[in-house]
Structure formats: structure tokens, C-alpha cells
Amino acid sequence: MKRSVFFLSDGTGITAETLGHSLLSQFEGIDFEELTIPYVDTVEKAWAAVHEINRLAEAGTRPIIIDTIVNKDIREVIAKANGCMLDVFETFVGKLEKELHSHSVDKVGKSHSIVNNETYNVRIEAVHFALDNDDGARTRHYDKADIILTGVSRSGKTPTSLYMALQFGIHVGNYPLTEDDFDDLRLPAALKEHKKKLFGLVIDPERLCAIRQERKANSRYASIQQCEMETRAAIALFNREGIPYINTTHLSIEEISTRILAIAGIKRRLV
């Protein structure tokens, strides 16, 4: 079964996509064909979107529309489309206005604006820290890290570090474990004094093999035997040293990051 889904926004479309993905993930067995139309900030653009929605509706099942458009006039145009419309502002903002006895500001892009310089600086500083302390290139600043991710190559350390920095303002270092680190199942010297900050990422050998094949096809580095050996050794090291860890194989970056914060008991600097 296939259904077309339109994410419409008068801004970037990020909020519409995020909410939409959360809702659509609850329905299995349906192939959703997604189309995002950002910056629908005029009536003319709204009618253009309606025409596109109606064109697909005529060719088959009517599309699903998830919009986060602030302007009521533009929303009224979108409502004329032949689709199932899920209007975020109409659904939630109206109820909040009644409850809070206050009118919304109806300002486009409010959720993604820079609220204040302090918040912005926290985010940028955390991202810079993640980049400067990526992949074990530098370890002298680990004393300033909130957490240090460690695991075998391609287990998800770098993208998780950057996501945690960007979304939560957390200072994250990451250190790759190599074959040499598994000889005696001891922590590398650079990590020993920061043991309490360590958090491990592991991944199933089959998935690790597939990822490494894309990077270095048919190499020893990407062989299933090497991936199995490194994965077993990493888990053994984490267990021996009492380092908490999670398996990232079937988790999104968002899930990995949130679980790490919960397990490690680290508070977000950004909310």
C-alpha cells in the first residue's frame, strides 16, 4: 500500500517533518512517498501546493497533508486541497490560546530562531568541541568533556557526538578502539584517567561489515572476520572495565543520543 505525504511549512519544514515521521512510524506495511514543500509563505505558493496535491489525488489515493503554517489565510487555501489535512497550528495553538488566555504571536520560524546569544553560543561551543576532539585526534581536552564515546571504527561515534553537541549542547569527545587496543584488553593510556566519562558503542558484526564495505570494499578492515573479532573484543573490554555501552545497530542517532544521556545521567544544556 502506498500513500503520498506532503509536509508543508512557511519555514524550513523541519518541524512538520519531525512530527510527521513520528506519526507515520506508527503505521507499518504502508509505503509513504514523502514530499516536503518549505517556505509556503504566500497565498500564491499555497495554491501551487494545492495544485500539486490535487494532481496526485486525481492519479490515485488522496495525499496526507501535515502542515505547520502559521498564517491563517494560507492555511485556509491549503485546506481546499483534496487531501487528509493535519493542521498542527489549528489543532494545538487554538487550544493553548484558550487555556493560556493569550493570543499566539503568529511569527514564522519562531521555533528555529536564535532565542538568545547564550543558547546560541552553548551550541556552537559544543559543536566546536566535538569537531576538535573527534576520532582520537586530540585527547588533551578530555578533562573538559562531559562524556567520551568509544568503540570500534564506524560504530557511530562521530555522528552521535555531533548530534549531542548540536541538539543538547553536550561536550563530547570520541575515541576509536583499534586492533592494537585489544591485545591485552586494557584501556588505552589516553582513556585511563577519564574512565568515569567513557561510554561504549557497539554494533552487530554483519552491519559493521556492510558499513565498512562501503568505505573500503574487499579489505581486511571490512571483512566479516575482522568485524566479528573487533566487536567481541570491544564488548569484552567494556565488560571488564565496567564501561556502560549500548548496541547501535537498530537505533537512530536520536535514539542513541537520548539513551546515552539517560544511562549516563547527563543533563542537557539545551532543551
Image: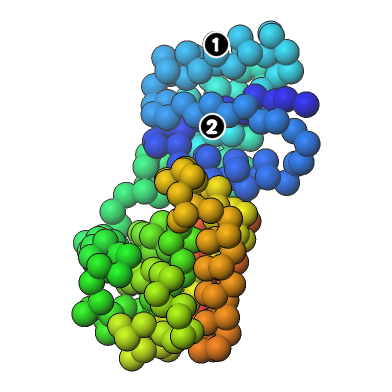
Q: x, y (%) of residue 243?
A: 51, 84
Estimate how packed mark 2 is, as few (under 14), some (14 to 19) or many (20 or more) residues with alpha carbons within 10 Å: many
Q: Amino acid at mark 2?
A: Phe
Tag 1 residue:
51
Q: x, y (%) of residue 217?
A: 46, 43
Tag 2 residue:
7
Which sits in the foreground, 41 or 196? 196
Q: x, y (%) of residue 267?
A: 44, 77
Q: x, y (%) of residue 207?
A: 59, 53
State whether residue 240 is above or below residue 169.
below
Q: Amino acid at mark 1?
A: His
Q: CA distance from mark 2 to mark 1?
A: 15 Å
Which quadrant of the rendered structure holds the C terminus?
bottom left
Which sits in the foreground, 215 or 59? 215
Q: Dot 1 lies on which element?
A: helix
Residue at 61 percent of width and 9 percent of height: 55
Q: Which colour scheme appears in the figure?
A: rainbow
Whether residue 89 can be seen here: no
State whether residue 104 is above or below residue 175.
above
Which quadrant of the rendered structure holds the N terminus?
top right
Closer to the chain start, of discs 2 and 1, is 2
**Numbered circles on residues, count:** 2
Estimate how packed mark 1 is, as few (under 14), some (14 to 19) or many (20 or more) residues with alpha carbons within 10 Å: some
